[in-house]
Image (cartoon, helix red, strand yellow):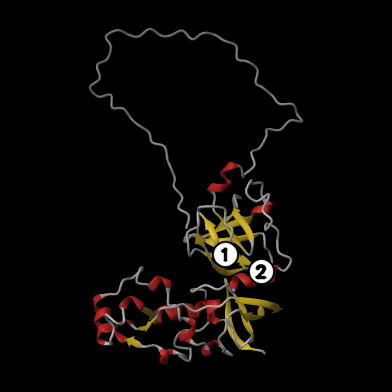
Amino acid sequence: IIAIFLISGCSITNDDAGTTLPTTEPTTATVPTTTAPPPTTLPPETTPPTEPPYHEDIMAVPMIRMMGMLYVLDKAEDSFTQQLPDNYVYLGFCYENNDSIPKRDTSSRYIPSYTELYASLEVPDYIYYDTGEGYQRLIRAALVENTVSKDDPDNTVPEAYIQAFFNTLLQVDAHNPYAQAAGQVFYQPEEVDLYMQFYNGFREWSHYEVPLTGEEETFLAANGWGEKKPMSNARRFPISAMDQQLQRFFGITFWESWGVGLDRMEHYREENQCYYHWRSDTRGSQATISSVEKENDTYRITYQLKDDYYGNTYRMTLIKTDGVLQIYSNVIIK
């Protein structure tokens, strides 16, 4: 999220009340008569030099590396918009690291961690990030004059741009819904395994963000949690959080799902409609995409998983909707 600070000038008014006026009238100063020099004119063929939009200040603007390419702030007047362009969809989120020029995908400068990013399946030159008040456009650094990308070997568009897009979409991350759907088997959204899909819990419901309440600790203690089973390992799975992700990324509500996997959750607390389960690890495996097929707004991604000991080949079907590619199915094809 970028905060914009506006500095406005102040006017100071002096109060002349109580000021003693001089007893004599001041002498009027004589203004010397001078002849103003003629205005300087440029030859018709000469134009004032214009400063390129990017100079030494390039390191002070937002930038990010995605799909192997470096993007920097687009300084065009129309680069900020309230509504995301039609052909842009959710691609993931970033991790802020202001120590150097971003070297790895999802690494950013001056863009806060977990800021959502949007990219086009057709145009690789721009991406947008959500500021909370609208969407700010970034431009591929190779398209503007700057000092940080001219020697960057990864600054050209990949020949297989669509595959690069989906490699980023499915990259392994504890809170990436596409990466968590990978490796499951379901033929329609309602069949998704909620235990596996939300195995890593929700970042916004971690103990760092929302500490356990006294009521939650009492509930867990009554269910055997304590010294030998530390409450710090109690991962929360609120129905509201599951419902929000299911609606956005699967196109169904929590109650429309078949509830697959809920029986493997350890405890359910009715008072706050939340499941709890012991967690000391995270789930996820890197996908290697072998092909991408497109039919209208449907994409079928064939891939393998690095840690799949069975050597399965999977096919994930995604449907392009407003601002997001929704997951329809994920099946084994061989």
> In front: 287, or 192?
287
Does residue 295 appear in this view?
no
Q: Please, which residue is most extreme toward the right here? A: 45
Q: Quadrant where the C terminus lies?
A: bottom right
In the displayed structure, 150 sits above or below 248; it is above
Residue 113: x %, y % from top left: 47, 62
> In front: 314, or 274?
314
Residue 130: x %, y % from top left: 51, 62
Q: Residue at x 38, y 72 (%)?
A: 206
Residue 110: x %, y % from top left: 50, 54
Residue type at mark 1 is Leu
Tell me which label, 2 or 1, sits earlier in the chain. Answer: 1
Around disc 1, counting alpha carbons within 10 Å, would you say few (fewer than 14), some (14 to 19), or many (20 or more)?
Answer: some
User: Which quarter of the figure has residue 305?
Assistant: bottom right
**What residue sits right under mark 2 in the picture?**
164
**What residue sits right under mark 1 in the picture?**
84
Q: Which of pointers 2 and 1 indicates the residue nearer the eye?
A: 2
